Image (cartoon, grey):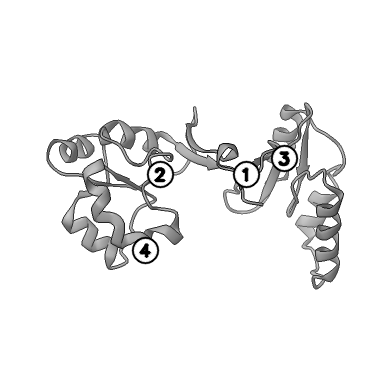
Amino acid sequence: MLVLFASAVQGWMVRGPVAAPLVQQQQQQQQLDAARAAAPAMKASRRASENAGKVEEEKLYSPEEAVALMKELATAKFTETAELHGNLNLDPKYNDQQIRTTVALPHGTGKSVRVAVLAEGAAADEAKAAGADLVGMADLIEEIAAGNLNFEVLLATPPAMPKLAKLGKVLGPKGLMPSPKAGTVTAAPGEAVGEFKAGKIEFRTDKQ
């Protein structure tokens, strides 16, 4: 996996296969260096060694250079994942500095997403027409309670939310609990299904 880091200046840094965010605080960097020194040494594969030699770790790349280099280094036999980490100079322990929202990617994620919807009546019909993979209420809640999580996104209409309280321990650890901030609690499930099927994703600030 390759990672792009956006710094506060107009440049990008490419690290791979394992990287740390661009942290300005010297103390955090020292802690990171100490942790690496204490970790048992692992022999890098030939592919990882070859890729590492193509990256100037202290160089700030332009976005175009960084993406081109990331594609060049993606030589695994499977479709690799790219992550984007940005230093926003925020402290998420304060409520007014927390970010959690969604964005619709213009070209999707390249993956097929299974969407389940908790809805009844006209809302359920709307979700089915939009291509939802699973639609239901009491029956779907029972399936989820039994541990059957055959979906990547769970949408819920507002009337369904009180019934989801008992599923917090099942959905919470998987990051599947519907939330208004994540756009997964909606009175228009048909529109939401279309957006998530097309590549709508959630992003948030890290707690670190």
Q: Secondary structure at mark 2?
A: loop
Q: Residue at x 75, y 51 (%)?
A: 20
Left or right of 152 in this view: 86: right
Tell me if residue 51 can be seen: yes
- Return the disc, 4 or 3, that comes first in the chain's sequence: 3
Which label number is shown at residue 5? 3
- Return the disc, 4 or 2, that comes first in the chain's sequence: 2
Foreground mark, 3 or 2?
3
Foreground mark, 4 or 1?
4
Q: Residue at x 35, y 53 (%)?
A: 151
Task: Count residues near mark 1 (Cα–Cα under 10 Å), then give few for <14, some for 14-19, many for 20+.
Answer: few
Q: CA distance from mark 4 to mark 3?
A: 33 Å
Residue 138, position as x, y percentages in the image? 17, 56
Residue 121, position as x, y percentages in the image? 12, 40
Amino acid carrying mark 1 in the image:
Ala
- Return the disc, 1 or 3, that comes first in the chain's sequence: 3
Amino acid carrying mark 4 in the image:
Val
